[in-house]
Amino acid sequence: MPSAFVSLTAGELRTANVANLEGELSALWQSAAEDPETQQAVTRASVLTLLAYVESQEAGAETLDLIAQITPENPCRAIVMIAERAANAAALRASISARCRTPSPGEKQVCCETVSIYASGDAVEGLKSLVVPLIIPELPVYLWWRTDHFAPAEYMADILRVADRVLVDSAGYKDAEKGLADLAQQVRRSWGARRLAFSDLNWSRLTPWRELLAHCFDFPQATDCLRRISRVRIEWIADGSAQPRAGAAPYLLAAWLAGRLGWKPETTVEKPGSRVFNLEAEGQPVQIICGTAEASRAGAPRASVSVETRGEPAAVFHFRESAGERKIEARCEVGGRLPFERTVLLQPAGVNNLLGDELRFPSHDTIYEEVLDAFASMIAASN
Amino acid sequence: MATTTVVTNPLREGMRLRKTPDPCAVTIFGASGDLTARKLVPALFSLDREGMLPAAFAVIGCAKTPYNNEKFRQVMAEALKKYSDVPADEASVADFVKRFYYLTDNFSDIKAYSQLTNLLNKLDEESGTKGNRLFYNATPPSQFPVIVRHLESAGLAKPKRPGKSWTRIVIEKPFGRDLESARQLNAVVLSVFSEDQVYRIDHYLGKETVQNLLVLRFANGIFEPIWNRRYIDHVEITVAEDIGIEGRGGYYEEAGLLRDMIQNHVMSVLSLVAMEPPASFEAAQVRDEKAKVLRAIRPFDLDRLSEYAVRGQYQQGWVRGESVPAYRSEPKVSPASTTETYTALKFSVDNWRWAGVPFYVRSGKRLAKHISEIVIEFRRVPHMVFGKTWRDSVEPNIMAVRIQPNEGISVKFNAKFPATTMQIRPVKMEFRYADSFGVETPGAYETLLLDCMLGDQTLFTREDAVEMAWELLTPVLERWQQDRAGGLAFYEAGSWGPAEADALLARDARHWHRL
């Protein structure tokens, strides 16, 4: 029969005394040291504290599973908060588990610990009293916010106060425009004495796009085209009926271009299946159209960006990600010169990969914060 | 109206993605050899699996061995299954080697280069490699100059489209066998290529911990203030191998340990430990600072060489429970060989930071274990407040940077043993990559090949560094050559080297750290 520690390392959650979680964790490692089945020395490793916030038990289970996938490369103390405020009964309960990497012969077994805290009804107010004391001193604290928009309730204020970085995923926002605008507001609010950093897994998904777009404008003739851009069309296939305009990705790219190139928002118009942003660049109009591609159209790309310029020499920049192919292709032509063509292969962008990547960057992503700010101004231009 | 030109690309700012190289073709001379199968191709495969290779990419193998494209692909696929560190499933391997081509010819003959030129041009057209070319010399050193000259004659040394494409050449060690030959090799290479096209590869510098040494020193505020003669007593660098010469008797008889390990690996590590902080982590700045260290190393006093240098050769002994033969009994080794398989040296770095701090280095074959480590021993406390009992028994602080295996950093300091009386015990605080990051550290060739394709020369050895290292070590080699067997110390295989190496430190009232 497997011993206590070994079953915990297999991912089994054990009910813990909420009043003494730190003690429970110490007991867990004590049992590891004494367990006859843990044949190698056990090392408790942590390079950060990862907090996760979800609002359903189903999301909680999924989050625990994703965390298990990233801990081998990002040893941490993970604390998953499952808050069901709407539930009638007030309850607060916790469980703990350990996750260990299979060691090579003669090596130490490296383990991380996971604490799962379930809070319902008014007991959600007690979450902070359990979470804050469990944070590992002097190591970075990441708060992974897994709801359909980032709008923390008052009871999360103390937890936000100890966090260094908030991770969201705007791909899942039901209302991408409102979600991004609210997020921008939260980022502005955090610009106090102690600035909280923000990351968006959806922004990370766009990194190969940004890299390729930037690369095409690296050449001197192409760089000069940046000030002559007249229209940008960004199209994404909707990832399901819940996201009528393909989530936030086209908006993030649009705001990135506008923010980086210093375009000033003037008006914005919502049209069936698209949103048009009218901006101004050094006295010249620039239009960005964010729309939805028709998924059913044969040969339609999964996503595409085309950039048009005014004046001479004529230039065309076109980028597309074909449906079913993990690559983005770029074709750029300036003044009839031989076209520049480049293909970038896309790496798997599962949530676990993206999260793992984000945990390696402790500092502010100032460009992302600039993007949110630019988007907030662009969407506010409609009023 | 005057128009202004945007000179910088604002879209570039804040990119976190690791840059992928430009489309390119990698030509490997000596492609049927061991290095290609064991190191180069597995490293390229690993980069491919990580998405770090460009979509338009090709490998051209060049050698006399009569393969064709199919055979080369088959041999490399088998090598990947055997040597790859990342999972090499059938489909990924087949997909990867599709981009491999092979030319059978004698590349010491200029005639062979026309078919290479044709193939490169064809790949530019058909595979989109855009005229970017990386030539990798994995041939015996004697062929380097010939290949370099033929590349020039074939018009392959200069970028195909100046300003729009690049041409680079990678040269494997040894970079010469003494100062004179190193100068000759550099002269040949630099008469054809410019220094910024030349990548002299020392795989040791691609190791993660070697690079981490720079991060440790220059990204932490607590170490640099004490990284000097005021706080450091001495530095030890050990590069120990438990293996022998692995059937390379012919090569080793010509080379010896000092040429094989000290001139390149150990001198590079020493310069990273001792260098001043560069203004930035850019190739030119890092290489400038490394060169300054080599320039500051005091030349050996040849009349008192035995006080600074020890050479040894292993005799029969036991390694990992197996009886192993003496060096002189190895195949292709002379029974009267005086080639050194062990070297220990004491260096002095004559500058303000290191005056009076000896750098002891040692390296050898058939030593007690396989380990590479840098040990920084700090000075003892100036006054022991805990009384005479502890004055001599409290150990100095040690920082150890483990390069391989189990890469990591440890710090030894003293702590009070829990007791009612004062008892002081040394304790060790340890950081291990595997524990904290849980990721496989990229292989050295992986890092370095990627850097070559990206055009980053930071981890490659510059012409002046090669020559300065030879300038210091060639007189030692010459003196040993004159002395023949005189002064050659013997050690038992499986030991930590000859007693003379212990005496080298004992003269300074020090001892090698136990590893």
Image (tube, coloured by chain):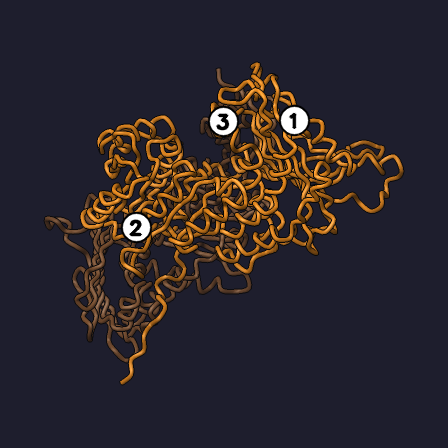
The chain whose colour is orange is B
Residue A76 visible in the snapshot: no
Name which residue lies at 58% across and 29% down.
B339
What residue did someone put label 3 on?
A: A103
Q: Residue lying furthest front in this view?
A: B482
Q: Look at the numbered disc 3 and give the secondary structure of its residue.
A: loop
Disc on res. B419: none
Q: Check if mark 1's residue and mark 2's residue have beta carbons within 8 Å.
A: no
Q: Chain of mark 1?
A: B
Amino acid type, label 3: Pro
Residue A110: x and y in percent read: 52, 31
Q: Residue furthest right?
A: B388
Of badges 3 and 2, the one in the foreground is: 2
The residue to which callout 1 is attached is B496
Residue B153 bears which disc, if any?
2
Residue nearest the observer in this picture, A79 or B134: B134
